[in-house]
Image (tube, helix red, strand yellow):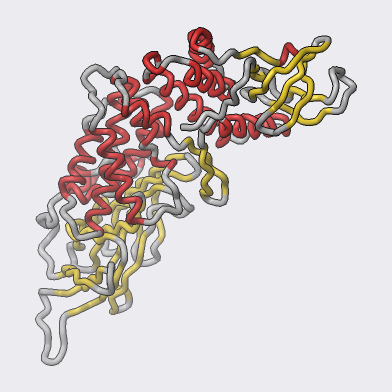
């Protein structure tokens, strides 16, 4: 990490936003630029109630009111005072850039033997909070200018906050250098846990990263979390680590399944971490993270189960077989084993291919041999349902999405056939859209592909209490 201090006898830090750097020591003098919290200047003199300063970052000198600055001596004797300041600023919202400046001054001035993991833990906390402020879109032009000034000030001290584009919007994330130093030093278990959680956030993965790079990164994230000693951690941090591990291992299971590698261990690990959670020990602010982990684990839920499950439905000749198609593609063929092939013909009813993961153990056959459903996962956090059914004497394949809007995480479960009806069956869907979590229990008509009855509560759909599938009931995470 680079802290760009210039060797000089006396420095000062700007402590107020939009502090005017003027050409002369008067309020009426020309304002050359505006300085913001955390900006560092060299003091070269004083006149009236102004200090004459030089800004090395902007390569510009001028005058600024003395009350808008705090002198800063870069020597070991001053380091302890700087430490007290950044310890206080850790709990002051909006003072992140100033905290970064004081922490950088401490790291520059302190003796190497006095520098411990606490300073880098504080630096990472300041940087993370600054990135979070940038993502929350400050209201008003002055607030936007202040935020831009704080980001520039942080960058001057070597704190890199990356900018990504997500859904057409800018998204800011700290690159985590200070947290990496925490993990490399003798740190407390709590400091290690906080650093590991900060470095393994799913929303700070480069959306433009190649799939192969993403897979390597996920394995690295899992390794970082597993190295944290949880014995002395508070219960809250233990639960947060479990949440993060559950989501990461579900992604690894999907990735390994796509590559035809053994995946059941990773899928079981994801489920184990999630089911081991104690929701009562999570704070209110952890609820979105809890729901996110649930959606991620549920999307890859079939990875924790054997490749084939015994069919509990009435015996039927319908079955799917999977064969390799083009590179990376899986092709599924629906056949009727109960109907022997005639001379010169085969018993193939329909065929469809996918580049996603077809969970063959999920196939469920209609009791009257009228349809078959299959879970197909196309992304780590997206699982849809393929409906193979007979329409007007011909077999077709329709895809039932997990949501009608445009969610970023979603899955749909087959929840049971309804006896006495060839057209209706039960669905359960859960999705996150624009930060909001929604679930629905539905009676679905396969003929018109429309939902006939829907509710956010299972007890409000009477047919669920009667005909929900026993397998779905035993493996679903929706009733968490």
Q: Give the left or right position of residue 1, taking residue 11 as reference.
A: left
Q: Can you say whether 80 is above or below 464 in the image?
A: above
Name the spot of residue 267 as percent of width and height, x first.
20, 46
Q: Dividing the image into 4 quarters, which one contains the C terminus? A: top left
- Outermost bottom residue: 344
Q: Nearer the viewer, residue 35 or 90?
A: 35
Q: Where does the image place residue 133, in percent across and percent down from the top left?
A: 56, 31
Residue 143 in which image quadrant:
top right
Residue situated in front as seen by the camera: 194 or 453: 194
Foreground residue, 404 or 361? 361
Would you identify the image quadrant in which residue 53 lies? Answer: top right
**In the figure, residue 293 lies in which quadrant?**
top left
Q: Is residue 160 visible?
A: yes
65 left or right, relative to 264: right
Res 88 visible: no
Residue depicted at x 39% and y 29%? 179
Above/below status of 285 relative to 311: above
Residue 21 point in image, percent of width and height = 77, 25
What residue lies at 37% left-to-right and 20% top-to-bottom? 117
Q: Is residue 77 above or below residue 290?
A: above
Residue occupying the point 27% across, 53% down = 255
Q: Residue at x 24, y 49 (%)?
A: 253
In the picture, measured across the screen, residue 469 lies left or right of residue 171, that is left
Q: Residue furthest right?
A: 28
The location of residue 397, given as percent across then percent down, is 32, 70
Lateral position of residue 344 relative to residue 283, left or right: left
In this figure, what is the number of numbered marks?
A: 0
């Amino acid at each position: 990490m680079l802290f760009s201090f210039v060797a000089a006898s006396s420095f000062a830090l700007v402590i107020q936003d939009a502090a005017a750097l003027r050409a002369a020591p008067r309020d009426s003098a020309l304002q050359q630029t505006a300085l913001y919290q955390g900006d560092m200047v060299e003091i070269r003199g004083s006149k009236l109630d102004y200090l004459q300063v030089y800004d090395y970052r902007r390569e510009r000198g001028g005058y600024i009111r003395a009350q808008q600055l705090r002198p800063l001596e870069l020597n070991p004797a001053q380091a302890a005072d700087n430490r007290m300041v950044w310890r206080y600023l850790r709990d002051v919202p909006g003072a992140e850039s100033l905290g970064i400046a004081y922490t950088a001054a401490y790291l520059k001035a302190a003796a190497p033997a006095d520098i411990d993991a606490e300073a880098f833990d504080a630096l990472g906390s300041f940087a993370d909070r600054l990135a979070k402020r940038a993502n929350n879109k400050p209201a008003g032009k002055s607030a936007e200018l202040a935020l831009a000034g704080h980001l520039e000030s942080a960058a001057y001290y070597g704190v890199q906050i990356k900018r990504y584009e997500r859904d057409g919007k800018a998204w800011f994330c700290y690159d985590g250098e200070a947290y990496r130093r925490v993990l490399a030093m003798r740190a407390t278990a709590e400091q290690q846990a906080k650093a590991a959680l900060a470095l393994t956030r799913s929303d700070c993965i480069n959306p433009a990263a190649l799939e192969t790079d993403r897979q390597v990164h996920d394995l690295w994230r899992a390794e970082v979390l597993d190295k944290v000693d949880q014995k002395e951690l508070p219960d809250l941090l233990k639960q947060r680590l479990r949440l993060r591990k559950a989501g990461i291992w579900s992604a690894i299971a999907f990735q390994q399944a796509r590559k035809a590698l053994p995946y059941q261990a990773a899928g079981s690990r994801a489920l184990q971490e999630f089911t081991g959670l104690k929701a009562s020990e999570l704070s209110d602010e952890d609820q979105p993270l809890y729901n996110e982990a649930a959606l991620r684990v549920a999307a890859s839920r079939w990875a924790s189960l054997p490749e084939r499950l015994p069919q509990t439905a009435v015996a039927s000749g319908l079955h799917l077989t999977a064969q390799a198609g083009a590179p990376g593609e899986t092709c599924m063929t629906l056949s009727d084993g109960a109907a022997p092939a005639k001379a010169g013909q085969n018993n193939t009813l329909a065929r469809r291919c996918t580049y996603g993961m077809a969970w063959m153990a999920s196939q469920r056959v209609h009791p009257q041999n009228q349809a078959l459903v299959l879970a197909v996962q196309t992304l780590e956090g997206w699982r849809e349902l393929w409906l193979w059914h007979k329409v007007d004497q011909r077999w077709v394949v329709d895809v039932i999405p997990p949501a009608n809007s445009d969610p970023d995480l979603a899955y749909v479960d087959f929840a049971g056939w309804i006896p006495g009806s060839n057209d209706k069956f039960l669905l359960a869907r859960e999705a996150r859209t624009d930060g909001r979590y929604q679930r629905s229990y539905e009676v679905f008509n396969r003929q018109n592909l429309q939902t006939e009855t829907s509710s956010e509560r299972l007890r409000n759909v009477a047919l669920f209490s009667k005909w929900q599938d026993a397998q779905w009931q035993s493996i679903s995470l929706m009733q968490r």
